[in-house]
Every structure is written in structure tokens, then in C-alpha cells.
Image (cartoon, coloured by chain):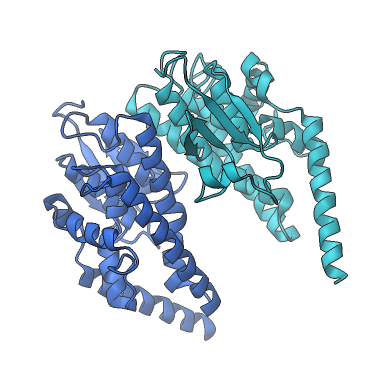
Chain colours: A blue, B cyan
Amino acid sequence: MAGGGDELKLLGMWASPYVIRVKLALGFKGLSYEDVEEEDVFTGKSELLLKSNPVHKKVPVLLHNGKPVCESQIIVQYIDEAFVGTRPSFLPADPYEGAIARFWAAYVDDKLLPSWLQSFGGKTEEEKAEGLKQTLAAVEHMETAFKEISKGKPFFGGDSVGYLDVTLGALIAWVHAGEKLTGFRLFDATRSPLLNEWVDRFGELDAAKAVLPDADRLVDYTMMRQAKAAAAAAAASNN
Amino acid sequence: MAGGGDELKLLGMWASPYVIRVKLALGFKGLSYEDVEEEDVFTGKSELLLKSNPVHKKVPVLLHNGKPVCESQIIVQYIDEAFVGTRPSFLPADPYEGAIARFWAAYVDDKLLPSWLQSFGGKTEEEKAEGLKQTLAAVEHMETAFKEISKGKPFFGGDSVGYLDVTLGALIAWVHAGEKLTGFRLFDATRSPLLNEWVDRFGELDAAKAVLPDADRLVDYTMMRQAKAAAAAAAASNN
């Protein structure tokens, strides 16, 4: 375990689910850190971000005593391995259970999240419909996975929060914001009753409450971004 | 470590770099396994494959005493964790070095491989040119990464083969086949002298020689697939 002299600095952006994921991991581990908010990750990236993540130039980046770790799932695994003993590991000790957790964590980022984004951000109605179709299929897979992995316990990790809880938990604030914005709730009581309950259960945890942004703030942020994009498109078409 | 009674079965397809990756991991660990070749992963998938990987329906799948593990990088990590003690771990013990290895392994699959595929498989000349541009940028990043990670030693893993060697090593047969097919060598002496030498060094290892398919066989296979695709397109346009 790293000693008490560790300096942790997180380069992030409050609304990003990938950044929220890292904040959840730090929170559940009880680690304090300096929260460095990038002014605008879309237009003006800081020198520190560009220097720390020269390959992808993206948040989140965790600086541990000045050494950068990039990519949210890799950062969570790093936190799990570098700060052992503060609480049960996120990843299970059993290699097979670990492989299953990694499989579904990859599924969240490779399938669930892109499909969901496409369901409301697609360029055409066809693209949006295809996104929704794939989202519903992904939710069905995730619901089955929760049932098989949790085995009747409250979390993917069993009695305490595990790797997959942290990975998927980062989406919870956006589940609420998405419902307010579009009327579509990613995990609802009909299609995914177990995950619907898990959303509330996870959201009630102290570490989650301390980290997850307010849904109304995400709604305002989304509408502001949409207005900016529309203004930019209008300005471009006037040139 | 798993005992001598372990049954390992690999559902694969000989030309797939993702399958080759798993074979390399098994080979370097000195593990014997049943090699189950899917007849045709593109048209007729076996019942065992569909049952073992119902989410992605793709090879490779490693069955360990009947329990399936899917996704090549997750399988390699599983093999590393489930069969300890047979040789040094692929992933370094140091969490920071582990995070760096995972970062670049993800980069191989998320950036290098898709760009390279696009450079010759793109639908238009513009797409191919963009793919080549991104490939060259990715090669430059990987060359720098090799220099920083290997610190003058022969492999990404230092004196012995590590996680990133196994991940990238799976592409070596395709580096040679690609050169024969298109004249473009992914890692060459001019742009990436260190990786160019690493290709030969890795390919000379006994475990690699036992696993990597012959480049001429990959060339024949690629031409057969291209001819089939052209015949299918011609048949479709005649309908």
C-alpha cells in the first residue's frame, strides 16, 4: 500500500461519466485527492492535461505523486492495486470472477454506453432507432449479468461494491438526467427490475452521494451544450 | 495455481490475431490445451461457440474445465492469474507498470489495429489514406512506448516476454503477410527501428514459432476471402 505521503491529483470534468468513475473509486477507497477541473475539455485543454495524456489528450487522468495514469477503467484497476488494504478490493480475488467482472465492464464502455449515446445523439431518426434497439438489448444482457453475478446479494461485488458497481455506477446520475431530458430511463422497473433497484441502492451509498452530480445540473449542462452546438451550426451556415 | 487436472479448450480460428494472442499466452505458460477450430467464423458458428459466448458470439473463447472466458485481452489476464508460478507473470507486479502495460495493450486494439485494417480495407481511397495516416501516428507512439517501457531490454516485459509482448506479438505473422500483400510493413527499420528488431526477436522465440501462422498461408487465405467477397458482390449485383 502506498504511504500517507501520497499526492493524488485528478484531472477531470465534473459531468464526464469516466471522471465520475474514478471519483467513485477514490471515494470508496477513502482516498483524498486534489480535484482539478479542466476549464473546457472540448476547446481549451490545459498544458498539464496535454503533457499527462499526450496520446489521447482526454480526462480523466490520475496523477499519483506526479506520475500519470490514463483511461478510467485502467485508473480504477490501478487504484485497486496501488491502495490495497483500505477496503475489500474492487476486483475479486478469484481469477474467474475477475475475468467476468472485466468482461462486463468492457461491455459497459464498448456497447451499452455508445448505444445509449446514439439513441438520443444519432444524426438521423434511423440512427437513433438503431441506438435504442441496441441499448435495450444491452440492458437485457446487463440485467441477466447482474442476476448471475450478484447471486441475490445487493451489488455486483456481492455484499460490498465491486469493480462492476464502480464502472456502471458512474452512469447513475446520467440515468436520472436522461430520464428528465428524454423520458427514457436506462434501467427501469419493467425491463430491468433488478438494475432499477440497484440504481437506488448504489445512489444511497455515502460515497456515491458525495460524488454523483445532481441530475438537474446535468440537464442544464446538456441544454447549454445543445444551445451552443445549435448556435455554432447556425453561424457556420451563415458563412 | 490450477492443478494438473485442468482441462483447457480453445475455441478459435487460426488466422485471427485475437486467437493467436491467446495461443501465445498459453504457449509461453507451457499449458497444453485442445485447439478447437471453428469451421467458418463468418457464416456458420458452432453451437458450442454460441453457447459459450452468447453476448459477442466471437472467438476466441477459452473453456477452463468447461467455464468460458471471452475477449482476448481478458483471457490473457485470466491465464496469467489462474496459472501462476509456471513462469514470470505477464503483468508486472508493480501497479504503475501494470497500468502502463494495460494502457498500451488497449491502444493496440483500439487504435493501431483498426487504423491498420482501415489502411487497406477502407471503402474509399480517402478512408484508406486516413487509415494509413493514423497507422503511422500509432506506430510512432508504439515505438516511443517500447523505448520507454523496455529501457534497453529485449522485450516490453524486460528480459522476458510480458503482457504487451503477447498482445502485440499476435500481429507479427500479419506484419509479414501484410508486407507481402501490400508492400507496407507495419514496423519497418526506418520509422520504427526498435519495433522492427523486436518483431524478429519475438518471432524467433520457440513459443512464438510454434504458434504464429506462416505468412504465405495468411496471404493465400486473404486472397481466397477477397475472391469470395468479390464473387458474392457480383452475384448480388446480378440479382
Is B139 in front, or is A81?
A81
Name the side, left or right, on which A6 lies relative to A46. Answer: left
Is B77 in front, or is B145?
B77
Asked if B147 appears above or below B235 in the picture, the reply is above
Percent across and percent down for residue B29 are: 52, 18
Which image quadrant for residue A231?
Answer: bottom left
Q: Quadrant of the C terminus of chain B?
A: bottom right
Asked if A222 appears above or below B33 in the picture, the reply is below
Q: Residue at left 65%, top 14%? A: B206
Q: Quadrant of the N terminus of chain B?
A: top left
Answer whether residue B39 is visible to the viewer in this image: yes
Q: Residue at left 22%, top 39%? A: A8
Is B21 in front, or is B5?
B5
Q: Residue at left 71%, top 55%? A: B122
Name the side, left or right, on which B45 lies relative to A212. Answer: right
Which image quadrant for residue B85?
Answer: top left
Percent across and percent down for residue A61 are: 33, 45
Name the side, left or right, on which B43 lies relative to A23. Answer: right
Percent across and percent down for residue A135 are: 44, 64
Answer whether residue A33 is visible to the viewer in this image: no
